């Protein structure tokens, strides 16, 4: 006999404002359009994590569906206020109309309500205090803007 279990609850962990450099265009490959977006910094604020995004990461993108789908794989490091460094690997799906996708690719603003942008961050840190980061599942929402990427992360409780 099967049983429907109650849905998990979400706990707001933090919000990120990630700054980026202009994209490095790899070009149209057999897999799709490849781009790499350098991550130059940012700020992390929230009820459970606070700190900064360190420069040196990147978002590796594969654009499909004639430009309407972006499969994202961002990897970067957050330095928390106590000095602890957290490795982030954030995979995401961004879907938009062809018109809005072209605006995003050109670095123009779009209405966030018209874009589906969801992510699954994985977080890792050293030390007992932050072990819960490796022992939890996270999901999030994102918004791409001309000046960067804005994310909200939630722990699945």
Image (cartoon, rainbow, N blue to C red):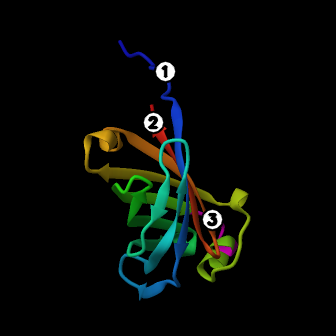
The residue positioned 74% from the left and 64% from the top of the image is 111
Q: Name the residue under label 3.
A: 96
What residue span does the magenta drawing correspond to?
95-99
Q: Mark 1 points at which residue?
A: 6
Q: Mark 2 points at which residue?
A: 156
- Compared to 108, does 69 lie above or below? above
Badge count: 3
Give the distance between the C-alpha atoms of the residues marked 2 and 3, in whole angstroms: 26 Å
Which mark is first along the chain, 1 or 3? 1
Residue situated in front as seen by the camera: 62 or 81: 81
Extreme-left residue of the structure: 127
The part of the image, by quadrant, that contains residue 30 is bottom left
Q: Where is residue 117 in the image (x, y as percent from the top left)?
A: 57, 57
- Compared to 68, does 25 lie above or below? below
Disc on res. 85: none
Give the distance between the C-alpha atoms of the residues marked 3 and 1, in whole angstroms: 31 Å
The residue positioned 32% from the left and 40% from the top of the image is 129
């Amino acid at each position: 006999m099967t049983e429907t279990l109650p849905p998990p609850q979400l706990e707001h962990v933090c919000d990120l404002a990630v700054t980026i450099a202009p994209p490095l265009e790899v070009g149209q490959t057999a897999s799709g359009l490849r781009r790499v977006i350098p991550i130059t910094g940012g700020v992390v604020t929230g009820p459970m994590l606070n700190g900064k995004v360190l420069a040196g990461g990147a978002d590796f993108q594969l654009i499909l569906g004639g430009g309407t789908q972006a499969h994202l794989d961002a990897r970067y490091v957050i330095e928390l206020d106590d000095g602890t460094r957290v490795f982030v690997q954030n995979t995401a799906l961004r879907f938009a109309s062809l018109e809005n996708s072209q605006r995003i690719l050109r670095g123009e603003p779009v209405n966030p309500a018209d874009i589906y942008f969801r992510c699954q961050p994985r977080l890792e840190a050293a030390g007992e205090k932050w072990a819960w980061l490796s022992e939890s599942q996270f999901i999030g929402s994102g918004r791409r803007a001309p000046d960067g990427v804005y994310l909200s992360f939630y722990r699945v409780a």
